[in-house]
Image (tube, rainbow, N blue to C red):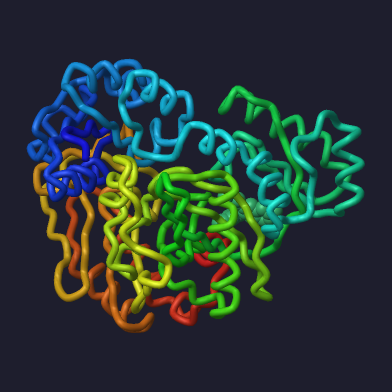
Amino acid sequence: MFRRILIANRGEIALRILRACHELQIETVCVFSEEDRGAAYMDLADRTICIGGPFPRDSYLKSDRIIAAAEVAGADAIHPGYGFLAENAAFAEKCRACKIEFIGPGAEAMRLLGDKASARALAKKTKVPTVPGSDGVFENDSEAIRIAERIGFPLMIKAAAGGGGRGMRIVLDKTDLVAAIKQAQQEAEGAFKSTDLYIEKYLERPRHVEVQIMADHEGTVVHLGERDCTLQRRYQKLIEESPSPAIDSRTRKDLCAAAVKLARVAKYTSAGTVEFLVNSKGKFYFMEVNTRIQVEHPVTEMTTGIDLIKMQIRVAAGESLDVNQRSIRPRGHAIECRVNAEDPEAMFRPCAGRIEKFHPPAGFGVRVETYGHEGCRVSPRYDSLLAKVIVHQPTRPAAIRCMHRCLHEFTIEPIKTTLPFLRKVMSHPDFVAGNVDTGFVERTF
Ligand code: MV4
């Protein structure tokens, strides 16, 4: 097992990883930016090292400084959390070259699955259902037109290097195609330094259902059930739950089996998520793979009783999985609400400042993941995620009632948060009925 882990992240996920390390009796090193100097969660770290200025590109994205910090502090592994360097294959390779274990998948699997066009090609080859579309990236406009005419409109142009909705365009008919390709190319070039694009048929009003997988270095792959993340706004998830209220047990079985199959052929290790879109008839299609631990992982931890961060650390240290598929028995219903420092009345504009009053909820089946406390500062430089409220109850109606209670108990002042918005969703008849799609938030609020 590792002796000392460096945490290359900040905020709630840095705290989550710190706690897991200490339960495993592993020492911790926390790196931080000038902006995060003095943040209370770092009191729990055995050592803290400043790695640069407030902008992510000057600190949390500076791979060489992070590796240097790990070497100086004698850390034998780095946990990247989510965001920042978590899905950067070059960073994973640098860690390996410096004999520091990167807690995540190998660089090869990360590269193969991180490119959405190659992940899609692998899914297709593996007979995991994919949306009709191009075989890999297209070369030029005339090839794109040929593919578009074959699959029909509406369709989507997507950036191979994209993710979370960046570099995507919906194309309603042929007259818009060439202009959309140009726009998507420009966006992709700017954001990812790659103009590779591919085409998919556009699925209307889908649900987003993803499968949590975990794999060790012996080739054992298990799934931990699915999460339904349909409630989003502008590709930002707001509420996640498990099990999905939208799929039957047969679909669930097929979906989870497809995710495991894909992880096996990719020789995947560590925690990962295979994302699918599900249409109103319950047919599912592979979308992309997230090669990291995700924000919403606690939903799965609550239903399975498995600590995914600890499991990730054990697997990275070379231990084999201490569970098998039959022993993983999801129970009850879990819901997570993301409490963001944003003003829902002002188009979810990020809000920053000092928190004067902070009273998180607690009680039976309630878990709160946050770096927040009275007197803490919320920076405008970083992700607005302030707290995650996760509830676990025997049934979905009980979980909704419990979440409703928690959201009323939670007091944060004076900064604006998404709490009032989340309260409205919890009492909305369509959410209560499990009858929403990915356009629900924009249509309803
Ligand atoms: C799609 C789609 C419809 N058809 N692909 C958005 C983020 C990325 N993970 C995939 N996304 C979508 N891909 C096809 N072929 C609709 C979306 C989409 C979406 C997906 C999940 C949750 C919310 C969404 C909101 C708008 C669009």
**Where, by quadrant of the figure, is residue 392 drawn?**
bottom left
Q: Position of residue 266 (x, y in %)?
A: 57, 44
> Left or right of 283: which side holds 425?
left
Q: Position of residue 133 (x, y in %)?
A: 79, 49
Q: Position of residue 137 (x, y in %)?
A: 75, 35
User: In front: 123, or 348?
Assistant: 123
- Looking at the image, is 229 positioned above or below residue 295? below
Up-down relation of residue 363 to residue 354 (above or below): below
Residue in the picture at 53% in, 54% down: 274
In the visual, does 20 lie left or right of 245? left
User: How many marks on residues?
Assistant: 0
Tell me: 359 left or right of 34. Answer: left
Q: Is residue 247 left or right of residue 311?
A: right
Task: Give the vertical position of 288 relative to 402 (above or below).
Answer: above
Residue at the image position 47 percent from the left and 65 percent from the top: 226
Query: For residue 152, which quarter of the picture?
Result: bottom right
Q: Residue at x 15, y 27 (%)?
A: 37
In the rendered image, which quarter contains the N terminus? top left
Q: At which x and y percent is residue 180? A: 76, 37
* Residue at 18% over, 16% down: 72
